[in-house]
Image (cartoon, grey):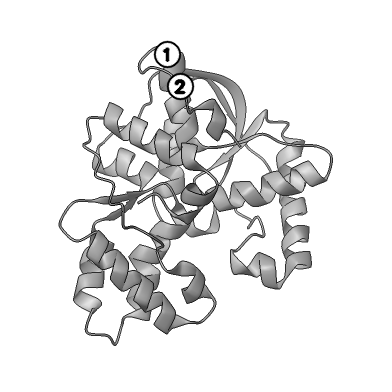
Amino acid sequence: MATCLCDAFYDDVAVATVQVLEYLGCEIIFPDGQTCCGQPAFNAGDWPASRKVVRHTLEVFAGTDPVILPSGSCTAMLRHGNLLAFEKEPDLPAVEALSARTWELADYIVHALKIERWPGKFESSVAFHRSCHSRGTGSADAAVRLLSSIEGLNLVTFGEGEQCCGFGGTFSVAFPHISGAMGRLKLEHVNAAAPRLLTSGDSSCLMHLGGLAAKSGAPLPTLHFVQILRDALVNGGLIPRDSRQEAGRS
């Protein structure tokens, strides 16, 4: 499932996800009818609208195959948010079944495919942002484990690493000043570690932090961690470079 942000802004994240999973021997099925996980309506309190979107997702992703998402946020919605929205609905068994086979990408690579070291090379110092929706799951730790194993990659730590970036989806729209202040505080801690780029498992966080950094006059390059995994394979000569790769960079 590519997610709305990949569809609208970060197509290369979806491309990189396919390239990485195919390198690992996975066969990719991409349902054309997919739309949204239902989280925007759910977070706004419009649960009836969210259920309508999720019912469509249940139809599009019917079956028994694992559903992989390059997003901790959307994964959290399909795994947990939907269970709340449907707790008194007749569709709950189908929702529970989808929840059980939904995986965040790094979590799937490390804990389902049992890949703990990543081949190739990537010469850079990188700061990893742990998104709120990856807390309490194996997602962030799995991504850190993969990134830390890449030749040439220096994963730097920074202060208050568990703090929110301030985006919060509709929160950033409803409370832009609070959201911006939280993001700028996060950037202060990140910049103090002087990384060459910032990465995360959630493109929404990177969009927020990257936008604030650019507006401040001190732009900070951002890449989703799967783009780093893909680039490491390319740099190591393990897969060919895709012509769309550079065009999708943030």
Residue 121 locus on image (x, y percent): 47, 17
From what the image shows, is residue 200 above or below residue 79?
above
Residue pointed to by mark 1: 236
Q: Looking at the image, which residue sits at the far top? A: 237
Q: Looking at the image, which residue sits at the far right? A: 217
Residue 78 falls in which quadrant of the image? Answer: bottom left
- For the residue pair 71 and 49, the one nearer the viewer reads as 49
Residue 218 locus on image (x, y percent): 81, 37
Residue 144 visible to the viewer: no
Q: Is residue 160 left or right of residue 226?
A: right
Residue 171 visible to the viewer: yes
Identify the mark at residue 109; answer none if there is no mark: none
Residue type for callout 2? Ala
Indicate the quadrant containing the C terminus: top left, top right, bottom left or bottom right.
top right
Q: CA distance from mark 2 to mark 1?
A: 6 Å
Label 1 residue SS: loop
Residue 129 falls in which quadrant of the image? Answer: top right
Q: Number of callouts in the render?
A: 2
Residue type for callout 1? Gly
Residue 199 locus on image (x, y percent): 57, 38
- For the residue pair 138 and 10, the one nearer the viewer reads as 10
Q: Looking at the image, which residue sits at the far front? A: 32
* Picture residue at 41% right of the left edge, 76% below the top: 50
Label 2 residue SS: helix
- For the residue pair 161 and 210, the one nearer the viewer reads as 210
Q: Are marks 2 and 1 in contact (CB under 8 Å)?
A: yes
Q: How many C-alpha atoms fall within 10 Å of the one at disc 1: few (<14), some, or many (≥20)?
A: some
* Picture residue at 60% right of the left edge, 31% below the top: 126
* Picture residue at 35% right of the left edge, 30% below the top: 19
Residue pointed to by mark 2: 232
Q: How many C-alpha atoms fall within 10 Å of the one at disc 2: few (<14), some, or many (≥20)?
A: many
* Picture residue at 23% right of the left edge, 66% below the top: 59
